[in-house]
Amino acid sequence: MQSNQMQALSGKELEYIADSISNEDLLIKQLAATAGTTQNQTVQQICVQHIQSHSQHMNSLIQLLQQHQQYAPAQPQ
Amino acid sequence: MNAHNGTAFMADEDLLNTVLADLKRTVREYTTAATESNCQTVRRVFNDLTMDTLRLQGELYTRMSQMNMYTPPGKALRQDVDKQIQTAHQTQAKCQQFVQQKTGGAGAFNQAAGIPVHQPNVHNHNPYYM
């Protein structure tokens, strides 16, 4: 069950966040490469818009890590 | 990274298809992460990211379709749809029977609103038919 209280991240949650950051990073790079290659203005526009959204996703994930940073134990429990 | 001879690194269609495929995979991973979250704050973030990535995937798909970069899937045949409806009604009836057996009728089994009860192709006019 989920808790309302801010708590330490589980190992699984940390892995999912790290994988998600990696996914967002890949999407941003793919979109940037497409935007830099295309001759089609519509495609370029779509890519730029999506890069902004994925950058926001990445920020949310980094913030999530930072919010939980202080609750992480120094030793395995 | 355009080559100087004007040949693109990859066609726009291929590049956007790669992004589209990665968006589909990312939505699945966000959904899994949300269902496996212990902390409600973490779950909420994964839930929001699922919804927003789903929106982005849908938007990209629509834009690609409009630019004829995506071939829409073929239409399912009427006979196949009819067969699936028949099978679904049988499954639903058996499920309903199971629920009634186990709950003694206490478990309400609602048929979805607006879906007509299956009409069999062969009509039985026997008034004693149950």
Image (cartoon, coloured by chain):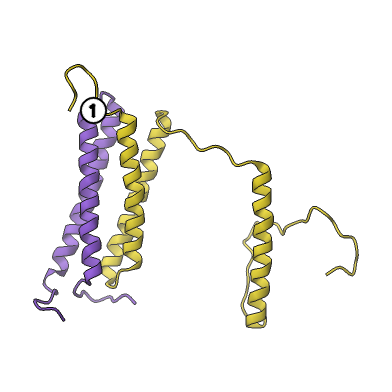
The residue located at (33%, 33%) in the rendering is: B14
The residue located at (51%, 38%) in the rendering is: B73
Where is residue B97, by image quadrant? Answer: bottom right
Q: Position of residue B100 (x, y in %)?
A: 67, 78
**Shade of chain A as shown in the rendered figure:** purple
Looking at the rendered structure, the secondary structure element under dot 1 is loop
Is any atom of residue A52 visible in this view? no
- Judged left or right of residue B31, residue B118 is right
The amino acid type of the residue labelled 1 equals Phe
Q: How many marks?
A: 1
The residue located at (69%, 62%) in the rendering is: B90
Query: Which quadrant is the C terminus of chain A positioned in?
Result: bottom left
- Judged left or right of residue B96, residue B57 is left
Q: What chain is the yellow one?
A: B
- Judged left or right of residue B113, residue A22 is left
Q: Position of residue B94 (x, y in %)?
A: 67, 69
The residue located at (73%, 57%) in the rendering is: B118
For mark 1, what is the residue? B9
Where is residue A28, by image quadrant? Answer: top left
Query: Is B86 rendered above or below residue A14?
Result: above
Query: Is A76 rendered above or below residue B25?
Result: below
Is any atom of residue A5 visible in this view? yes
